[in-house]
Image: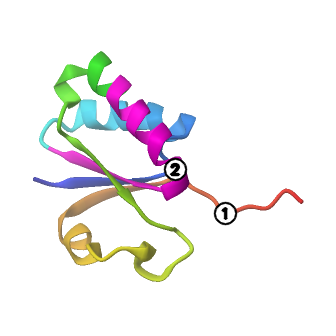
Amino acid sequence: MSIVFFTGFPGFLGTELLTKVLGRLPEHRAVCLIQSKFATRAKSRLEHIEKTHPDLHGRIELIAGDISQPDLGLDAITRLQEHTTEIFHLAAVYDLT
């Protein structure tokens, strides 16, 4: 199955866009790169999405990584590269101080 890759989940834009993209691509699944510190929030948001959009149940995978690291800090980068057909990069690194 083809993959749509997202960064920026569980943020507002990532969450809203995720459901719309998977709605138009019923044959795809999503892989969402999340920061470890947001894992609890991301799992909660995913549960809510799957409850309100039952057709998306089992089509979204959360993986912890870091956009500032080589290969996003992932061991599974090759699998993602081979199967990803679209990327939505919504994460950012910023410091407001």
The prevailing secondary structure element of the residues shown in magenta is helix
Disc 2 from disc 1: Cα separation: 10 Å
Looking at this rendering, what residue extends furthest in the top direction?
A: 52
* Total residue callouts: 2
- Tag 2, which secondary structure? loop
**Residue at horizontal 20 percent and vertical 46 percent from the top:** 29
Would you identify the image quadrant in which residue 68 lies? bottom right
Lateral position of residue 18 relative to residue 94, left or right: left
Q: Which of 76 and 1 is in front in this view?
A: 76
* Residue 32, horizontal then vertical, whole percent: 37, 51
Sequence order check: which comes first, mark 2 or mark 1? 2
Magenta stretch?
Answer: 28-48
User: Which amino acid lies under the numbered mark 2 shown in the image of this protein?
Assistant: Gly
The residue carrying mark 2 is 8
Q: Is residue 29 visible?
A: yes
Label for residue 64? Answer: none
Q: Nearer the viewer, residue 29 or 87?
A: 29
User: Which amino acid lies under the numbered mark 1 shown in the image of this protein?
Assistant: Val
- From the viewer's perspective, is residue 2 above or below residue 51? below
Would you identify the image quadrant in which residue 33 lies? bottom left
- From the viewer's perspective, is residue 48 above or below residue 10? above
Lateral position of residue 54 relative to residue 41, left or right: left
* Residue 40, horizontal then vertical, whole percent: 46, 41
**Residue at horizontal 44 percent and vertical 73 percent from the top:** 72
Task: Look at the image and tell me in which quarter the C terminus lies.
Answer: bottom right
The residue carrying mark 1 is 93
